[in-house]
Image (cartoon, helix red, strand yellow):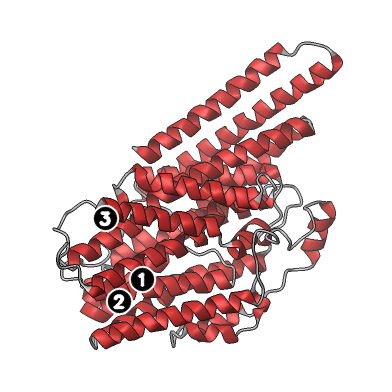
Amino acid sequence: MENFSLILAVVVITALAFDFTNGFHDTANAMATTISTGAMKPKVAVAMSAVLNLVGAFLSIEVANTISKGLVDETGIRPEVIFAALVGAILWNLLTWLVGLPSSSSHALMGGLIGATIASAGTGAVHGDVLVTKVLIPAVAAPLVAGIAAMIAARLTYTIGKNAHDKATSKGYRAGQITSAGLVSLAHGTNDAQKTMGIITLALVAGGALAPDSDPPVWVILSAGLAIALGTYLGGWRIIRTMGKGLTDLQPQQGFAAQTSAATVILASSHLGFSLSTTHSVSGAVMGAGLGRKGGVVRWSTATRMFVAWGLTLPAAALVGAGAEWVTSFGSWGTALVAVFLVASSAAIWLASRREVVDHTNVNDTDEPAGVVTTAVAAVTPPPVGTLTDDLPATVPDHAPAETPAKPPATAL
Amino acid sequence: MHIDWAALGSVFGVSLVVTVALVGLFTLGILGLSKRETATASGTSAALATTAAYACFAACAAAVAYGIYLIVA
């Protein structure tokens, strides 16, 4: 490790920062339904998810080198390219968190990588067909598969369980939800923490600090696991609120059906060779479960904003990644400029988030406890749509996420 | 471009069947426990319902264990 240069250190730190945003962005995937249905107290839920993410990070290192494999040409990739890719991914994660929308961290990372690679080596270095098979089709398929399964499962559990008594049901569904949420957390740790390990390893190899084809060193595994666990524990409460309360009103039966469907889809997809995004699966499952109850409603305005964010994730992260790579190509001062830009925009986004704080105390506050009246009210009054769909396309092309603080805080759901 | 429709199809099929089966089994288990509560309240025995409930939960637990095995392996 004698030639551990400054740029490598910067890449490693940025990768860990991405891992951290990945953790708090995806807490919602595992815990939104558990928190919104009251199966677990918010703080306890995120703590459990964090521990399971950390455990998951140590379970295997098989996925660690697959994030870039096939998607971009790795030969001749420079640490600066990876740095630029991470900048795009982090900013997109923070921006979607600010407006409280679940979006795929993997897509953000892939987008950043694609953009930075194109800026560095031209469009020829990106494999377009892999883009379609690994990104576009899964993005459409995941919510459909998980949604349909969750909808049928929710119908079934309401039908079978309609004569069951309250005490047995509340205890039972609670245990069921916690178990499936735990599985999702564990799977998330093995998948997503390893993506960061893969990125860091790729950078170390690219920078010459590690021999090609090496396994990730122990310190990489440890720091990646800790970063994702810390992010998970701090919790992306804005996204949890949208996923648990914003898309639909979940009862324990629905939460259980949704989380079980999501866990099954995630595990089945990664082991049958057609990887589906965790975020997309969980969002689809929540909506499916929402439709699976008689009189259940999905708030399509919120769902539409989420779909728009999904569509923008890859191009937006790619644009920022490409811009960042273009600036870093001017030399060390360019890289420093991008680093300053990243820190400044992150700080600006964080400051903007403080205008309307969402944390464990008010994560479930958007509605009164779910019930017949709430459902009826929700059906006639759509939640505030905010300005997201209008603002995002406008801010993205000139890739200046620093502008977002100027947006009205009304979008925070 | 090669799209692996077979893999996608099997993901869909397996997810659907497993999810519905697990949720169904689990609900049957809850129903069984609920029967036991009723029985205890009225002083009758509900051994069959209880046994069936635990069998359902055991099947779900096995599925979870298999899930963990898939994650670790």
Task: Give the number of the disc on residue A116.
Answer: 2
x, y (%) of residue A337? 34, 86
Task: Between residue A195 and residue A66, name the one nearer to us.
Answer: A195
| Nearer-the-camera pick, A320 or A46 | A46
Per the image, the residue denoted by label 1 is A86
Is residue A152 at all visible to an observer of this figure? no
Left or right placement of residue A220 versus residue A240 in this view: left
Q: Amino acid at mark 3?
A: Asn
Label 1: state its secondary structure. Answer: helix
The span from disc 3 to disc 1 (Cα, nearest Å) is 16 Å
Image quarter of the N terminus of chain A: bottom left
Tag 2, which chain?
Answer: A
**Horizontal placement of A182 versus A269: left or right?**
right
Horizontal side of residue A104 vs B58, given as left or right: left
Give the image location of residue A134, x and y in percent.
35, 59
Q: Nearer the viewer, mark 2 or mark 1?
A: 1
Tag 1 or tag 3, which sits nearer the N-term?
A: 3
